[in-house]
Every structure is written in structure tokens, then in C-alpha cells.
């Protein structure tokens, strides 16, 4: 369905024009502006599409050129563009709108308007016209000379290793991403359209889109490697980019390594943990689940087979067979890029010829150099290095009629490139780092259909272990490109391999490549994107944060912020009130060195607990000694320590244990085990309570600490299998405590005790912030359902922070909690002066 917001782009003034556009006729593939030249298929005709996908990439899948004589612009589909090929994964009635830049500059604003209207109407393409200076800073500056090397593990330590971070280039990157967001706004129907963003050029785009449409259906696929956290954390804007990723619904990577590095960065820098459920990896982020997808891209089988069937291709194959008759041909097809390892490949060939003199005059490495995608001194240095290494090798081992290295400088025709694939006995991909690289896939398919003509379809692939496709081609000869001897040995293995083994390896590769083509990849991503967005309208969403820190909070429809007026109203009508308060993260902010409550907190608690209608309890996981000392001024305050193992109703009453007996001999078994893991895990510590042991690993390395916690959990469960204890893992902790001890049990016991005294609670306020407090919320909910409270009781279960919870209410932070308690204290008729928490909170507002 076409969005009404695209009318400005199309310059439509009424519904008649809109109807005319939708009932368009079949449009040719190759066109001029104005006018039509050729035939074929640009946009399907007939009725309004039921579904639509907006595919966003740095460049449109369009070739543009201006005729010299007529000065008219000519446009045609770029069949090699991945974003065009992926349409085969969608149903025929799905409309695809492409957004991106043209590969040529169009300066005239009048031409830009005219071309925009033309491209949208005829190709469903929306061009983003970038000023030349901005395009240069964005693409050649920040993308290709900063992000590209960094994501390929090269730090800008000096000018020859990429450019250092430049705030002006970063601003240009953001400006371009914002322009792309504006273009999407012109055509999107946010309630129906799915958006699929491609690659590292547009990593900030999700934040701009999510800010404008909180429920936008947004997927992102990264086509380059995602570096390890040690590399990524050097990026000065690392948090901004990570948070932009997390504004997507689905994030795709080629390999698990790339996804693992991304998840590690989220854990180390943002404190987010992921979970795997039924085969899907998900990150919980402000109530939203961000799904991680791992699936390598494939090639377009139909297009490749079409080129293979052309007469021109067959002619080229015959010509090359005559040229290299009697030779063993190895093929390399690479962009001119410092990470492709082209010089290392040539050096390996030299090592092969040095060690195996019988191969001199027989082995030829044909290296096709695709045009570079960027410009600069680094590209020139790569070209010079390749030329020097190749010339030296040819000078050393060449002779009349034979050159061991044949450099073919692109661009060359597709037919000629396919012919080189067909006549090559082996392909060598020696990149030192590459996101995916589909060259081995292409080679496999072409050799399957245009092989040597002997009837045996075979291929041999020498593959760097540092590229994405190496994992899916298990029959390849994997090599370390930095190890020249290893690559030379791999070349020799390819030459001496038997035809039977070549055939078996080839069949294994072809089976995978043919079943995992680009259509399969696109279809799988689209299905997972729909699944990831399935619950968009089941939650309430609103945005928080400024700038690139913006994020959307998604919560259940019945989850509300606790309103002071609402709770005071219920508070004033009741007479048997139970107030339950967690301490750390609820009464006091996390991260403070001094955990003791200040005078204002003590004053508020005294005001509440001195009211005879109130039973006020601090329910904490802390030990009773520290809680007794801190709250000694509050004589009528109840305390439940160590998650309810010890409880007292007032400061003068005795501590009661929830257990009849205190057999804690299991500690003698668990403590030595914890001490062993503490010694082996830097940054970990043991908290020893009277009834429980807690192993903390929050200050250790996140990955190592998590791994050690899992091992410790298994170890403790094994040695304590016959003991009456519960071993559980929490947020950066492993805890061992007696069975039947929880904050939920505390709440249940307190309510039962009040009922036996004839004071069944008619008002319950429970505030907590972590997983242990969810037990309290669950118990309160169960008590309401079982009618264990007074009839018509006012119940307020409240969590701190906007996050998924069993509570029905939330408060933003500890400042909100203090202000809420201050309001209740004032309602008691004993107003106290505002606390520093309340003052600072109001000032921040």
C-alpha cells in the first residue's frame, strides 16, 4: 500500500493521480529520462500489492549514465546488486521499494526532482541525493577509511593504517543517515511496511527511524565482520552505534563469530545479557526483544546460469582453453583492497614454484583485479605492491610464452569472468579478513555447469580461514593466509588431488550452495523479521532519551506508572496496611560506596511505621546485622533479612527464623568450592551470610565470569545434591540458600500473621527492583486471586525501572520511590522536610 506521505515526492495533488499511478502499465528495464528505450521488467502491473518491503542500502540497484548526444539520463537495473537479487525471496505480490544513492552525481535540483519522480514511478526507487562534499566525508572518509579498516581489525595507529576518528566525519555520517531516514519517511506506511537496512554505512539509521515511529518494523543485516570487543571498544562512538543496532527488531550476521562479538560488546559495554530460546537468540532491551539471526548470504543461481548459457560465454571459454592449454590454472578474483591478501597469494605461488621445480612452466595464477571501491594512497600502495610482487615472480620463473602470474585488471565483462571460472582448476581466496566473499560459491556453480568437459564435474577451493564462507564450505582446503608455506602447501595439495576426491568435495559444496541461494537467505530473513515484530501491538511503547541515546520502552498494556494521587487515595481509605520495601536499588541507588540510609530515609520510615494502621517491612537479601545497625533508630520498623530467613516485627522484638532447625553443615561443603572458583576468577568474591553463601562475579571479565558461574553452578549442584539447599544463578551471582526461603514466602507469612490477628490487609504496597522481588509480586498476585486479603483491598505491586515484571506498576528510579514514600508520610499527618533525593529529582525535572 502506497503511503500518503509519498505524495510530495511524486508531486501528486489528488486521488485521481494516485489511482492512475497504482494502475500503471508494464515498464521497460532500460529507460531514458524523458522517454523509453528498451523492454523487459521493471515493475509488475495490475492491482495494489498486499504487502511491501522497503529495502535500504547505500546505493540503489540502478545503473545511471548520460548520453553524450542527447544529454538524456539512461537508467537500468544493476543485476549484480544484492539488494535487487533478494527480491526472488519474496512472493510475487510483495512490492519492494528501494532507497539509496545513485552512483553518479546529479547537481541540478530541477533534475533531481524530475529523476526522483521518474525512478519512483518506473523502478520504485527513491534516490538520496548527497552533496559531493558530504558524500566524500561520509563514504570515502568515515566509512571506507575509518569504519572499514576498524571492522576488519586494523586500528588507525598511524596515517598509513586508515584515518583516525574525526568528529567532523562522524557528523557527516550522521547527516547522511538522517537524510536516508527522511527519504524513508516520504514513502513508509509505518503500520504495514517492513524495512530492511543493509550494511555498515547506515548503522545509525535505526535510531532515527525508531524515534519517529516507535513501532517501526525494522531489520538490519551487517555484511562485514563485526570485530571482537577488544577492537570495537576503541571506537569513540561505540555506545551510540550499539544502541542504534538495538533499536532494530532483527539483526543479521553471516556467521556466529560475528554475532558472538556483537553480543559480547553488548554485554561488556551495555551490561546486556542474551538468551537462546527454541533456536532463537534474543536480547532483552527496555522491554523489547531484539532477535539475532545468523545466516550467510547466497548467490543468485538463475542469473549465473543465464550468463553461463550465453553464446558469448561459450566463445570466451574456448578462447581461454586455447590460451592456457596444458596449464594448471589457479584463479583469484578480488577487489583491490588491503585485506584481500593478493600479494600474499602471489608470494605463496612463488614458494610453490621454489619447492616444486617440476611445476614451473605448468602452473599459472590468473588474478582478476576488480576496481577498488574507494580511493586514496592506501589503494595505490596495494596496487603498487601487487604489481611489484607479480613482476618479480614473473622475472624469476617466467620464460617466453609463460608467465606464472597473469594480472587481469578490471572491469571485465561478466561473460569473460565466468569463462575464467570455467577453465580454472582451482580457485584461491586468500583474504586476511573478509565478511563473506561469494567468489567460491560462484566458482562452484560455474564449474558444475561449465567444467572441463570431461563429464566429471569437479572443483577445488583454497580458502582463507578468516572469511565468512569458510565455515559453510567444509570441503575446501583451509589455510592461514599469513603463513606463506601453508598456502603453498595447499596449492600443491589442490594440484595433486585425485579426480575422485575433487568430485566428492565439489558435490558437497554444490549441494549447499544450490540450496542456500540468495532467495533462501532473503526469504528466511523476511520470515524471522515478521516473527520478531509479531508482538508490536501487544505492548505500549514510548520513547525516552536524547540524541543517539534514544530508545523505545515497550511494556504490557496493563503496566502503569504508580501515581501518587492514586495511591494516597487508597491509602487514606484503609486501616490495615502492609508496606513492603526492598532496600538496595529501591530505597538506595545502586553503586553507592556507603550503603547506609541517610537521616531523611530514616525520618520517612519512622513517619510510616509509627502510624498504628501500618505494618512497614524492609525485605532485603542483606544480613540481619547490618540491617539492624542501620535501622536501629526505627523502633517500629519490621525487617526481613537474608531473603526472609530471619524476620522481626519491630526493633524490640526477637528475630524469628523461617526454618525449624538451622542445619547449615552444607556450608562446609560449598564454601571450599566457592573459594576455589574465587581464586581462579579475578574480580570475584564471596559473601557469607548466616543462612546463605553468594558468589559474586560482577567485577570479573563478563565472558569468563559467566563461564565460571555456569561451571560453579554445575559443581555445587553435584556436591550438594543430597543437601536441603537450593543452588541458583542470578544477575552476576551464584547463590546457595536453604530450600523454601524466598521473599515470596516472607510476604505469605506476613499476610497470614496479620489475618490471624484479625487485621487482614486492606492495603498492600510492595516495591522492589530485582529478580528476587518478583517472588513478592507473584505471591501478592496469588493472594489476590485466592482472596487472602480483605475484600476490596487496594494492592500496589511496583517495580523500579521500566522493564518486564509481574508487578502492575513501576517507578522510574529510587528518587521516585523516595518521593512516593514522602507523599505517604505526609498523608499520615506528619509531614517531614523534602529529602535530598526529592530535591535533586525535582531539580533534574
Image (cartoon, rainbow, N blue to C red):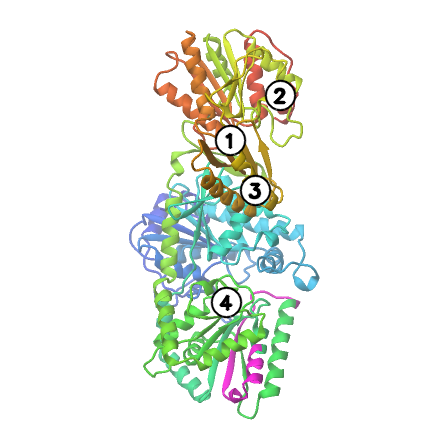
The single residue placed furthest to the right in the displayed view is 158
Q: Earlier in the sequence, mark 4 or mark 2?
A: 4
From the image, tell me which residue sits under label 4: 66
Question: Closer to the camera: disc 4 or disc 3?
Answer: 3
Is 840 in front, or is 101?
A: 840
Is 745 in front, or is 471?
A: 745
Q: Earlier in the sequence, mark 1 or mark 2?
A: 1
- Was residue 25 drawn as part of the magenta stretch in this picture? no
Left or right: residue 516 versus residue 290 is: left
Question: Closer to the camera: disc 2 or disc 3?
Answer: 3
Q: Earlier in the sequence, mark 4 or mark 3?
A: 4
With respect to residue 753, does 687 lie above or below? below
Q: Which mark is residue 838?
A: 2
From the image, tell me which residue sits under label 3: 270
Is 357 in front, or is 659?
A: 659
Question: Mark 1 touching mark 4, by CB under 8 A?
Answer: no
Number of residues whose C-alpha sits closer than 10 Å to that of mark 1, classed few (under 14), some (14–19) or many (20 or more): few
From the image, tell me which residue sits under label 1: 665
Amino acid at each position: 500500500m502506497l503511503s500518503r506521505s509519498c505524495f510530495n515526492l511524486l508531486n501528486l495533488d489528488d486521488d485521481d493521480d494516485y489511482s492512475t499511478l497504482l494502475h500503471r502499465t508494464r515498464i521497460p528495464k532500460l529507460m531514458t529520462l524523458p522517454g523509453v528505450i528498451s523492454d523487459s521488467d521493471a515493475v509488475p502491473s495490475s492491482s495494489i500489492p498486499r504487502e511491501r518491503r522497503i529495502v535500504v542500502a547505500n546505493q540503489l540497484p540502478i545503473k545511471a549514465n548520460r548520453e553524450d548526444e542527447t544529454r538524456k539520463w539512461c537508467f537500468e537495473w544493476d543485476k549484480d546488486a544484492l539488494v535487487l537479487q533478494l527480491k526472488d525471496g519474496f512472493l510475487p505480490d510483495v512490492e519492494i521499494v528501494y532507497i539509496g544513492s545513485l552512483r553518479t552525481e546529479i547537481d541540478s535540483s530541477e533534475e533531481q526532482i524530475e529523476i526522483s519522480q521518474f525512478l519512483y514511478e518506473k523502478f520504485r526507487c527513491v534516490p538520496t541525493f548527497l552533496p559531493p562534499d558530504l558524500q566524500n566525508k561520509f563514504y570515502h572518509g568515515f566509512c571506507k577509511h575509518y569504519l572499514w579498516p576498524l571492522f576488519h581489525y586494523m586500528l588507525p595507529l598511524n596515517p598509513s593504517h586508515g584515518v583516525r576518528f574525526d568528529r567532523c566525519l562522524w557528523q557527516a555520517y550522521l547527516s547522511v543517515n538522517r537524510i536516508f531516514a527522511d527519504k524513508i519517511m516520504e514513502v513508509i506506511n509505518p503500520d504495514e511496511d517492513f524495512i530492511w537496512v543493509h550494511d555498515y554505512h547506515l548503522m545509525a539509521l535505526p535510531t532515527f527511524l525508531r524515534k519517529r515511529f516507535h513501532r517501526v518494523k525494522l531489520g538490519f543485516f551487517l555484511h562485514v565482520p563485526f570485530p571482537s570487543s577488544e577492537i570495537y571498544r576503541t571506537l569513540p562512538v561505540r555506545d551510540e552505534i550499539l544502541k542504534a543496532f538495538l533499536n532494530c527488531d532483527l539483526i543479521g550476521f553471516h556467521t556466529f563469530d560475528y554475532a558472538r562479538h556483537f553480543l559480547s560488546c553488548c554485554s561488556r559495554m551495555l551490561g546486556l545479557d542474551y538468551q537462546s530460546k527454541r533456536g532463537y537468540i534474543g536480547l532483552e532491551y527496555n522491554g523489547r526483544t531484539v532477535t539475532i539471526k545468523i545466516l550467510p548470504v547466497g548467490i543468485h543461481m538463475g542469473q549465473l546460469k543465464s550468463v553461463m548459457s550465453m553464446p558469448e560465454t561459450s566463445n570466451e571459454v574456448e578462447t581461454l582453453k586455447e590460451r592456457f592449454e596444458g596449464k594448471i590454472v589457479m584463479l583469484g578474483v578480488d577487489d583491490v583492497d588491503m585485506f584481500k591478501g593478493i600479494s600474499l597469494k602471489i608470494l605463496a605461488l612463488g614458494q610453490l614454484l621454489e619447492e616444486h621445480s617440476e611445476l614451473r612452466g605448468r602452473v599459472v595464477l590468473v588474478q582478476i583485479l576488480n576496481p577498488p571501491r574507494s580511493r586514496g594512497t592506501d589503494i595505490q600502495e596495494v596496487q603498487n605492491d601487487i604489481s611489484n610482487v607479480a613482476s618479480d615472480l614473473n622475472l624469476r620463473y617466467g620464460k617466453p610464452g609463460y608467465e606464472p602470474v597473469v594480472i587481469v585488471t578490471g572491469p571485465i565483462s561478466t561473460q569473460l569472468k565466468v569463462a575464467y571460472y570455467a577453465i580454472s582448476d582451482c580457485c584461491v581466496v586468500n583474504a586476511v579478513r573478509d565478511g563473506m566473499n561469494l567468489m567460491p560459491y560462484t566458482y562452484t556453480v560455474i564449474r558444475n555447469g561449465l567444467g572441463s568437459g570431461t563429464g566429471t564435474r569437479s572443483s577445488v577451493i583454497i580458502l582463507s580461514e578468516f572469511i565468512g564462507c569458510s565455515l559453510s564450505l567444509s570441503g575446501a582446503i583451509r589455510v592461514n593466509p599469513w603463513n606463506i608455506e601453508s598456502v603453498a602447501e595447499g596449492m600443491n595439495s589442490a594440484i595433486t588431488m585425485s579426480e575422485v576426491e575433487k568430485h566428492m568435495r565439489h558435490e558437497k559444496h554444490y549441494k549447499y550452495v544450490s540450496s542456500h541461494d540468495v532467495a533462501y537467505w532473503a526469504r528466511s530473513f523476511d520470515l524471522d523479521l515478521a516473527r520478531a515484530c509479531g508482538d508490536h501491538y501487544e505492548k505500549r511503547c514510548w520513547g525516552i532519551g536524547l540524541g543517539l541515546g534514544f530508545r523505545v520502552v515497550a511494556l504490557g498494556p496493563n503496566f502503569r506508572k504508580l501515581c501518587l494521587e492514586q495511591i494516597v487515595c487508597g491509602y487514606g481509605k484503609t486501616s490495615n496496611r502492609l508496606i513492603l520495601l526492598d532496600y538496595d536499588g529501591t530505597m538506595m541507588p545502586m553503586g553507592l560506596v556507603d550503603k547506609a540510609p541517610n537521616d531523611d530515609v530514616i525520618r520517612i520510615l519512622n513517619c510510616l511505621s509509627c502510624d498504628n494502621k501500618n505494618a512497614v517491612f524492609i525485605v532485603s537479601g542483606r544480613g540481619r546485622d547490618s540491617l539492624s545497625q542501620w535501622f536501629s533508630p526505627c523502633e517500629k520498623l519490621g525487617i526481613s533479612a537474608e531473603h526472609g530467613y530471619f524476620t522481626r516485627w519491630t526493633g524490640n522484638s526477637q528475630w524469628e527464623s523461617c526454618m525449624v532447625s538451622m542445619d547449615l553443615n552444607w556450608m562446609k561443603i560449598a564454601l571450599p568450592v566457592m573459594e576455589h572458583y574465587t581464586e581462579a576468577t579475578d574480580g570475584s568474591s564471596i559473601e557469607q551470610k548466616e543462612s546463605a553463601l553468594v558468589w559474586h562475579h560482577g567485577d570479573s571479565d563478563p565472558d569468563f565470569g559467566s563461564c565460571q558461574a555456569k561451571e560453579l553452578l554445575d559443581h555445587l549442584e553435584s556436591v550438594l545434591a543430597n543437601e536441603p539447599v537450593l543452588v541458583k544463578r542470578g544477575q552476576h551471582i551464584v547463590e546457595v540458600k536453604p530450600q523454601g526461603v524466598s521473599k515470596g514466602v516472607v510476604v505469605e507469612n506476613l499476610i497470614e500473621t496479620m489475618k490471624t490477628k484479625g487485621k487482614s490487609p486492606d492495603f498492600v504496597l510492595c516495591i522492589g527492583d530485582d529478580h528476587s522481588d518478583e517472588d513478592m509480586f507473584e505471591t501478592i498476585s496469588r493472594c489476590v486471586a485466592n482472596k487472602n486479603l480483605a475484600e476490596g483491598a487496594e494492592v500496589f505491586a511496583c517495580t523500579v525501572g521500566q522493564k518486564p515484571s509481574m508487578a502492575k506498576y513501576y517507578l522510574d528510579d529510587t528518587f521516585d520511590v523516595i518521593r512516593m514514600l514522602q507523599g505517604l508520610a505526609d498523608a499520615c499527618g506528619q509531614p517531614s522536610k523534602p529529602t535530598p533525593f526529592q530535591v535533586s529529582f525535582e531539580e533534574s525535572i
